[in-house]
Image (spheres, grey):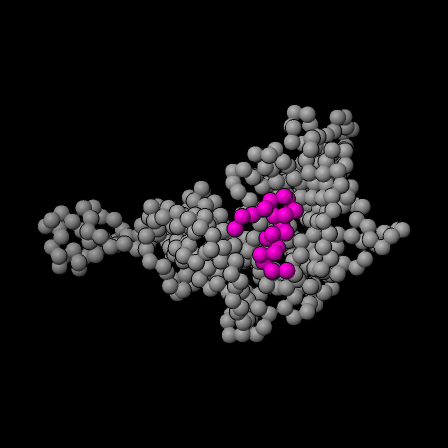
């Protein structure tokens, strides 16, 4: 069977507005979940379309997650110029002001100096975005989180007014500011509340990369990012790119050099129910032509997910004895959701329709891990 939805040649050449048969607007949603908004292939004039009603909630969720994570590692600081009358010299002395105000008679000096502060343009912009999105989201819990995080920023000293675009344009990100980049990018989306289209327009906007290799990786990161954002903490733990070891009992001296590593895409653990789900994402059709039938699950992927769940069985780790496996492929109009229990492990083969609306994509991703969201 041909890989209809994810055909590489289609993804590169593309129907206008699509990557393969995936709408480009949904590619931007994947970039949101993957916190990969800064990945782009250039800048071009693009038109804007209004966001669906549920997108502000999604943007608010992601912004709140990024800000909360940033607060755990301390906000980035910057320097600001400050003028003050001090009892000792700091920075440069303003001789004219000191003399005119006869400050020396009072034991003071007019000084201009640089001061380290968290009240930087980027932090003020993010705080303003939290205030803004907290007033427009539909879900009360998300609105409460945004307002709480904005209040936390104020208590830490981020108290200035929202910066102008001119102030933000001169702000430069360093190599250690990756998390700030993502945070500010989502904050920009809060104020725009629009997604770029493929049609020509008046706005100079980033153009998403259309290379198939990057889109495959984006899909994996987006699924991990989705569960990290949406699944309630601390009941759920999300691990992405986790390396697991083969249960080797005896080995020769050279086996370590040639034994392939096992790296899972996503591992979900629900503490309250004792569930562990190993998810492997693949960016192609879930079935292919078999030897004796029109459609068959890809045997290599089947062996891979089986190795992930069976090789980790350990009586000392009760969750490992009934770990679930999930092969998750994208699809457009070719949906599959089938399950088999093999030697005590439930293995599920499912697809998510990346051509559907954002609300439906969210519902499908939660459904495949057995979560029903009350909204």
- In this view of the protein, which residue sits in the foreground, 140 or 90? 140
The residue furthest left is 105
Tell me: 285 left or right of 220.
right
The residue furthest front is 374
Residue 112 location, x and y as percent? Answer: 25, 54
Q: Give the range drawn in magenta.
A: 356-375
Instruction: Give me the residue at 69% from left, 30% from top.
Output: 321
Does the stretch in magenta take in 42? Answer: no
The number of callouts visible is 0
- In this view of the protein, which residue sits in the foreground, 47 or 233? 233
What quarter of the picture does the N terminus occupy?
A: bottom right
* Residue 181 is at least partly visible in this image: no
Residue 4 location, x and y as percent? Answer: 75, 61
Tell me: 325 left or right of 109.
right
Tell me: 128 left or right of 368.
left
Instruction: Give me the residue at 65% from left, 28% from top.
Output: 318
Instruction: Give me the residue at 61% from left, 48% from top.
Output: 366
């Amino acid at each position: 069977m041909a890989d209809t939805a994810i055909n590489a040649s289609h993804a590169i050449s593309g129907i206008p507005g699509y990557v393969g048969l995936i709408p480009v607007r949904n590619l931007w949603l994947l970039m949101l979940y993957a916190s990969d908004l800064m990945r782009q292939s250039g800048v071009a004039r693009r038109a804007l379309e209004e966001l669906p009603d549920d997108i502000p909630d999604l943007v608010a969720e992601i912004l709140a997650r990024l800000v909360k994570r940033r607060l755990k590692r301390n906000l980035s600081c910057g320097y600001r110029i400050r003028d003050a009358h001090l009892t000792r010299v700091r920075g440069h002395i303003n001789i004219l002001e000191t003399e005119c105000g006869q400050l020396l008679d009072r034991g003071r000096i007019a000084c201009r100096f640089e001061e380290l502060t968290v009240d930087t343009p980027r932090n003020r912009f993010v705080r303003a975005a939290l205030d803004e999105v907290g007033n427009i989201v539909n879900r009360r819990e998300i609105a409460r989180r945004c307002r709480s995080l904005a209040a936390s920023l104020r208590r830490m000293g981020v108290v200035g007014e929202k910066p102008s675009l001119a102030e933000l344009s001169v702000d430069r990100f360093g190599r250690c500011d990756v998390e700030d980049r993502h945070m500010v990018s989502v904050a920009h989306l809060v104020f725009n509340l629009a997604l770029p289209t493929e049609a020509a327009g008046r706005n100079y906007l980033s153009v998403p990369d259309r290379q198939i290799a990057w889109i495959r990786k984006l899909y994996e990161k987006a699924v991990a990012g989705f569960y990290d954002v949406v699944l309630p903490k601390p009941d759920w733990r999300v691990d992405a790119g986790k390396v697991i070891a083969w249960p080797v009992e005896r080995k020769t001296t050279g086996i370590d050099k040639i034994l392939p590593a096992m790296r899972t895409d996503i591992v979900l653990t629900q503490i309250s129910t004792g569930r562990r789900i190993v998810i492997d994402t693949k960016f192609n059709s879930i079935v292919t032509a078999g030897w004796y039938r029109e459609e068959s699950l890809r045997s290599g992927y089947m062996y891979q997910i089986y190795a992930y769940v069976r090789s980790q069985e350990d009586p000392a780790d009760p969750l490992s004895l009934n770990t679930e496996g999930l092969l998750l492929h994208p699809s457009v109009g070719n949906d599959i959701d089938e399950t088999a229990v093999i030697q005590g492990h439930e293995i599920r083969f499912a697809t998510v329709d990346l051509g559907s609306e954002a609300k439906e994509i969210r519902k499908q991703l939660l459904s495949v891990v057995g979560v029903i969201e009350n909204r």
